[in-house]
Amino acid sequence: MNIRPLLFLAAAVLLLFGGWKLLNSDTARVRRTLRAAVRTLEKESQESALIGAVAAQQAAAYFTETPILEIRGVREGEITRDEIRYGVAYARAQVSRAEITLSDLSVTFPEDGRAEAGLTAHLRATAAGETTDWIQEFKVGLTRAAEGRLWHISRVATVDAVQWPGVD
């Protein structure tokens, strides 16, 4: 009897099971949550106001009820989902196009039900015919939802890439 087909089948099953476990791990879920949240912030040119309002509503849904923002020079403190929705809608209305790319995404789990992600975001926005690039490093805190499979953003903080002693 030729054992090669059985070995191939066993390897394929193990590979599929390993891939399924990897795609459904908490790390993969957190990464998907962050990438999906970012997609709601992006804007294509010629977008209708209705699509912008739906995107703002979707963006707010990725956050806990009262997340904490620590974005230097913009906002620091607790914020509501309504404020997120209004802020996203306002920001989208100010630009004709916005594209966000995430890089250096790392995820850790300091305790059960909580995750911390470090990432670098590159925003390219076009307003009044002028394109601006902005690169910023962030730390993002996430909390597992009661259902256990979903993650919600509970904290967003900017990270100073270079800190000089004595300079604030």
Image (cartoon, rainbow, N blue to C red):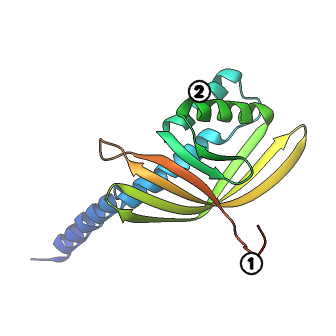
Cβ atoms under marks 1 and 2 closer than 8 Å = no
For numbered disc 1, what is the local secondary structure?
loop
Q: Is residue 64 visible?
A: no
Q: Which residue is mark 1?
A: 165
Q: What separation in Å lies between label 1 and label 2 (alpha carbons)?
A: 44 Å
The answer to whether 134 appears left or right of 100 in the picture is right
Q: Residue at x 31, y 42 (%)?
A: 146
Q: Which residue type does callout 1 highlight?
A: Pro
Residue 164, percent across and down?
76, 76
- Report which residue position mark 2 lands on: 54
Q: Position of residue 32 (x, y in %)?
A: 47, 51
In this picture, residue 46 sits left or right of residue 33: right
The location of residue 23, given as percent across then percent down, is 37, 57
Q: Secondary structure at mark 2?
A: helix
Instruction: Name the kind of residue labelled 2 in the image.
Output: Val
For the residue pair 98 and 56, the one nearer the viewer reads as 56
Give the left or right position of residue 98, taking residue 143 as reference.
right
Residue density around tag 2, few if under 14, some if 14–19, many if 20 or more, within 10 Å: few
Residue visible at 30% across and 60% down in the picture: 21
